[in-house]
Image: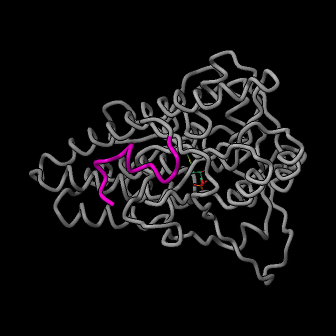
Amino acid sequence: MKVNGTPTRSIWRVEAQPVVEIIDQTALPHAYRILRLASLEDAAHAIRSMQVRGAPLIGATAAYGVALALERHADDGALASAIATLGATRPTAVNLHWALARMRQHLAPLQVAARCPAAWQEAAAINDEDVAQNRAIGEHGLELLKPLTEKHGRLDIMTHCNAGWLATVDHGTALSPVYAAFAAGIDVRVWVSETRPRNQGLLTAWELKQHGVPHTVIADNAAGLLLARGEVDAVIVGADRIAANGDVANKVGTYLKALAAREARVPFFVAAPRSTLDFDCASGGHIPIEEREGDELRVLHGRNGEGQPASVRQLPENEAVANPAFDVTPARFVSAIITERGSCAPDQLHMLYPEMKQ
Ligand code: MRU
């Protein structure tokens, strides 16, 4: 998608160099900064610190992280250790483990000398496939959205967190149908939920603005009112892991939107590629939920009046806080899951992916 009018991905390899570049998402929306990843440690740090974030992008970065690691050593021990380091960065997005398993499967049988170039190739393939899959999600999602425009000639979408192109390599998952609708000339507007405490909604607002898509930022707590008032035609969110029964783990707050959408009879769609499906996980109760540090709640970050980075403490250091980063929406609240192979009811995913074992 576009940054200042220029088509841009969220991650790319610097041509012919053992270096990867990313957009530092901890600096957005205030500053647009490119960071260089030149080692396994850089890649692991980027994922852990959320310089890159969003399930598909975490997987894509981990794949490049393996290639960066193998630049130094490519024996069995180094490969296993790189995969272990990257696999421990964040617990909920299964795309991380999917990408690492794919890298291991591809690289382990090769001669040590062949592994590093093969790792760069496979990581590039994972990245390119992510782009193609998300584009297809957009097309399938658009088919679900088109009939919803009949009500009042336009489309009001609500989303949560950032499941746009910044959260993937390009196009996004939840926002891909929105971009497809916008490209098709539909009058689409987006309610952007702030997504406390990390405020990923501000990333959503930033990327929608870059692309010219009309949107309005709301406090997370405003979602119920807007849904009840009939001001939303559909909710579309992404996912960090979808269990075999169709339960969906996504950014904390997603579940509340699903509940409110059900009560308001508004369709609740989840958009995700194959790399987000975890059929080894029987149901949502088995999905590990990341607990993040309490200071994300205690301290607010932004810019001061001079435009300089500034922090404000809103709770004392010793205030007890809980900070689960994800929640689980039961399959029964999900109207459809939109994948690169098409859309289906959450309990029908195995029909779209018959090759995946359950
Ligand atoms: O903690 P984050 O910012 O990595 O969480 C991101 C989300 O929850 C997204 O909604 C999800 O990864 C889908 S991204 C296409």
Q: Which residue ends up furthest to the top in the rendered image? A: 185
Q: Quadrant of the N terminus?
A: top right
Position of residue 150 measured from the top left corner of the image (x, y, whole percent): 75, 23
Query: Which coloring applies here?
Result: one colour
Quarter-wise, where is residue 119 in the image? top left
- Front-most of residues 1 and 173: 173
Q: Quadrant of residue 207?
A: top right
Q: Residue at x 48, y 67 (%)?
A: 283
Query: Residue 128 magenta-drawn?
Result: no
- What is the x, y in percent for residue 250? 60, 57
Residue 357 inside the magenta-drawn segment: yes
Figure check: 299 above or below 182? below
The residue under the point 52% across, 40% down is: 338
How many labels sit on residues?
A: 0
Q: Quadrant of the C terminus?
A: bottom left
In the rendered image of this protein, does residue 266 appear above or below residue 197?
above
Out of 216 and 69, give the one closest to the viewer.
216
Question: Where in the figure is residue 47, as x and y percent of width and height?
Answer: 50, 56
Residue found at x 57% / y 44%: 336
In the image, residue 55 above or below residue 135: below
Q: Is residue 292 left or right of residue 120?
A: right
Instruction: Specify the segment rendered in magenta.
Output: 344-358
Q: Identify the residue shown where x is 57% and y is 55%.
A: 50
Left or right: 96 as drawn, with respect to 164: left
Give how far across and how far down residue 125 sits, in percent. Answer: 32, 37
